Image (tube, rainbow, N blue to C red):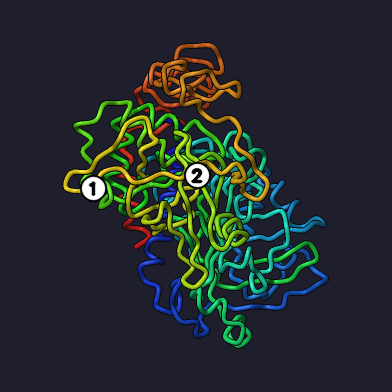
Amino acid sequence: MHIGKYLTLALVSATAIAAQSQASNRTSTQGRNGTTTQGRNGTTAGTANSTIYELLTAPNNHLNTSKFVSLVTSDSGYKPIVDLLQQPGNLTAFVPNDKILTKILGVWKAYAKAHKLNSTGEYPPANMSFNNITISDLLSYHVVGERVNLTNLTDSNVSLSVVHSLANQSNIAFFNGSGLPILIENNATWEQFHNQTWMNANSSYLQYEVGNGVNDTEVLVKDLNATNGFLNIIASVLIPPMKPSVVIDQVDDLDAFEDWIKQYPSINNTLNNSTNFTLFAPTSEALKNVDFQNMNNDTVEALFMNHFIPGVYFTPNITANALTNNGNTNFTSFSNVTFPAYFNSTSGNITLNDTTNIVHPNIFFNNGVMHVIDSIINSTSANANVTETGAAGPSSTVSTDPAATPTDGGASPTGQTDPNGQTDPNGQTDPNGQTDPNGQTDQGGQTDQGGQTDQGGQPDQNGQPDQGGQPDQAGPTATEVVTAAPTDMVTEIVTATA
């Protein structure tokens, strides 16, 4: 495996661990539903005469971002990021502070030294990659191509917003040209947010978080005004959304769902290879009484497809659609099951199929969005009835509403997997056997022994993508590290970032 994969994994893993540690240590004033006494999250006026980059590099600016500046000036590969932040435009930047970058860079240096990597620099190169994401791509996920003033932010009358970053490279983002999404939340409750008197008195003291829906981080300083946009200082590095099978593994209370999709490779492939969809994923508690052993494959896949919706529906989209019809809207799944959704404007809760609640919304993939729900979506109009042991039978269904159309604020569902066994003209995997589920496209025309994409065109003997076009050998070389398992590396990261 190439050095870049291990090192970028170290950076991403360290970031995730730091974000989780930060979340566990937050007080009630920093949670989404806590009170809003003023904390570390502050606002600085900035200056209308400086660009974002000039704010970052100004002497004695007290922003604690010198490590970020040193990183983006350490390698010519980062020059597009520097140019972007110092040129005219309309941007919003989220820049990690020195504290977290010092930890992550310390992990990188220690790991490189321990494994005798041929790297003497303090900062990783811009083209270092893991899962096709380079460090340069990672930084582009921290920039939004529009001015977003967090203090004044309202999206469809809800207390959170989804914006799209400039990480829109075709090999990492599958949103029809839109960049990978970023979730912005504040810690006002629904009732507080819709109490204008309360908001007038407290809006400037709200705490904000940004992230991918799984690993979120606190905004320490917000809305610094610059000539080319807004600058925000954050407490950790933002992790770009990845493919569903990677993200689902990181979400609490989805162990049973993860086991489900692993046992059925066609379902796993459908998730990873589709684009522009919404997944409603039941919790482990919701699945514990589902009698999978007495279902055939068609029934299991039909049940999954009840939860798989064409189109990207973040909760602001669901809310906006529902508010046009007294809180009601409909979804039609890929299995052609239509079920209602109800938005309660008093509590802010969203209920599906009359009894199912969204309990963890807006978890982002690189090709769609997932909402965790507390029961399964069942219907008599599926291909076969699904029963639960010790529970009632299938629920009722609602007729299709032709007016219900998927939306994500602009994107439309294309390139979806055809559940009926036909080849998808947009090149997506057909779960019924048209495309080989064990192997991805080989760009160079050679056989890939491990079922992964071979970027350079040579066989990969260990089953991993070969970024350089040569066979991946089992023995260590000057530019590769294969002696340490990923678990060893994660142990080092945990120790270093504790």
Quarter holding the C terminus is bottom left
**Amino acid type assigned to the residue bearing label 1 in the image:** Ala
The correct choice, above or below, for 357 with respect to 13 in the image is: below
Lower sequence index among marks 2 and 1: 2
Residue 268 in sight: yes
The residue at 44%/60% (across/down) is: 103
Which residue is nearer to you in this view: 493 or 15? Answer: 15
Residue ID for mark 1:
392
Which residue is nearer to you in this view: 141 or 309? Answer: 309
Residue 136 spot, x, y in % from top left: 61, 45
Quarter holding the N terminus is top left
Residue ID for mark 2:
278
Distance of label 2 from label 1 (alpha carbons): 26 Å
Helix, strand or loop at disc 1?
A: loop
The residue at 45%/64% (across/down) is: 349
**Amino acid type assigned to the residue bearing label 2 in the image:** Thr
Which residue is nearer to you in this view: 486 or 188? Answer: 188
Task: Judge the density around disc 1: few (<14), some (14-19), many (≥20) Cα neighbours within 10 Å.
Answer: few
Residue 81 spot, x, y in % from top left: 69, 50
Work out which residue is located at the far left of the displayed protein and give it: 390
Residue 232 spot, x, y in % from top left: 63, 67
Instruction: Identify the image quadrant of residue 279.
Output: top left
